Amino acid sequence: MSLLSPFALGPLLLPNRVVLAPLTRSRHAGQVPTDLAPTYYAQRAGAGLLIAEATQVSPRGQGYPDTPGIYTDEQVEAWRGVTDLVHAVGGRIALQLWHVGRVSHSSYHGGARPVAPSAIAATGKAMTPDFQMVDFETPHALTADEIAETVGQFRHGARLARQAGFDAVEIHGANGYLVEQFLSSGSNRRTDAYGGPVEHRLRFLHEVTEAVLEEWPADRVGARLSFGAGANGVRDDDPTETFGAAAEMLSDAGLAYLHGIRPNAQMGTTGGLDGLDAIRLLRDHFGGAVIANAGFDREQGEAIVDAGAADLVAYGRPFLANPDLPIRFAAQAAGLDAPLNEPDPATFYGGGAEGYTDYPIWDGRPAEAADARQAA
């Protein structure tokens, strides 16, 4: 049962290798974590590691309704309520530092356009603060001075995450957001020191990483990558070269882990990457721990850990719907009938306790837990 075996992630001793993936829930009015957030995370503290939902490092980093921030004292205090309760029940929790870049809309920014490395609009639709879907706008291309300011925002967010009591931080370099926009050739058409050859496109991530490492020891810092796979229209011409180089740079920086999202149909991010073993790419180019993410079930998670391709496996929707997921996995591995609750897509984003803190835990009886939510 390697998925359920302990693992040392830097100074953090994890009781198992099951990770809560960061999941945007859009429940934090005013960008301050809700009073329900401590309960939500504490319910899932049986994970080896919780990675809290993507959290913007500045107001310009927001692109979705009611997502939390980490740039004000009020946000720090609210997050402290989360970390205190998680620690009280024996858990470990990291904060994901986020800037959406062009995946935003002027309605979040007082009419100002979103920002990006280049003035190229994202594909698809933006979600406005009132949950309406509208066309993405052509973003403002960041100047060198604005890039330096944005790097400083990541530094500030990292500092506040320490004040809020997190055990680690994760740099969000995936899903077509700002860091990946700089990394990927399809979204970065700059001709200065931040664009062009891969070593220039790596510069923004390198500077963000250095800034975060000014606030945190490297063995408490991770990063997330998704390989220019098409999320929010971000694609890369040579993901093996680009993201192999990114993994090597982050390895040289001594980061504790890389969190890789394998291209998958559910995310709509398989185009152009057929045949790329994204998790193996990280293993081959990164010297620290590897977290595999996207679409794994228990057996697949066991298999990738047993094969040595990944050290931990992150679960999103299964963990959302099953706060006690490691317990259910352990029961299943022991041959017991421990069915999983089905996630309710209607309650993924926005709202209150429903679909957030009310999913039932397994009561040890074979089939009833799976039906309890529908019968309630």
Image (spheres, helix red, strand yellow):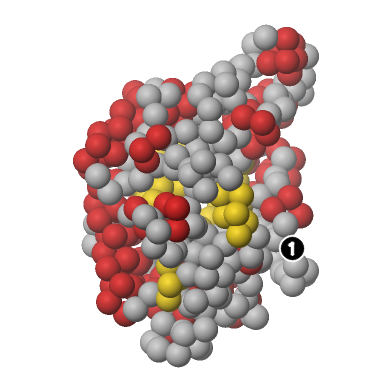
In the drawing, does residue 12 fall left or right of residue 15? Answer: left
Q: For the residue labelled by badge 1, is the local secondary structure a helix, a strand or a loop?
A: loop
Tell me if residue 210 comes above or below residue 331 in the rendering: below
Locate the C terminus and report the quarter of the image it occupies. top right
Residue kind at label 1, given as amino acid type: Thr
Q: Position of residue 213 (x, y in %)?
A: 29, 62
> Which residue is more in the foreground, 126 or 277?
126
**Residue 345: x and y, percent?**
68, 34
Name the residue at 24% across, 62% down.
Answer: 214
Whether residue 162 is situated above or below residue 38 in the rendered picture: below
Q: Quadrant of residue 346?
A: top right
Tell me if I can see residue 272 in this picture: yes
The residue beneath circle 1 is: 270
Residue 288 shows up from this direction: no
Dot 1 alpha-carbon crowd within 10 angstroms: few under 14, some 14 to 19, many 20 or more: some
Residue at 72% x, 57% y is 268
Label tally:
1
Residue 173 left/right relative to 261? left
Q: Position of residue 174 (x, y in %)?
A: 54, 60
Q: Residue at x 53, y 55 (%)?
A: 259
Image height check: is 39 above or below 151? above
Q: Quadrant of residue 355?
A: top right
Q: Position of residue 105 (x, y in %)?
A: 49, 57
Nearer to us in this view, 72 or 108: 108
Q: Residue placed at 70% from the left, 38% from the top?
A: 298
In the rendered image, the quadrant that contains the N terminus is top right
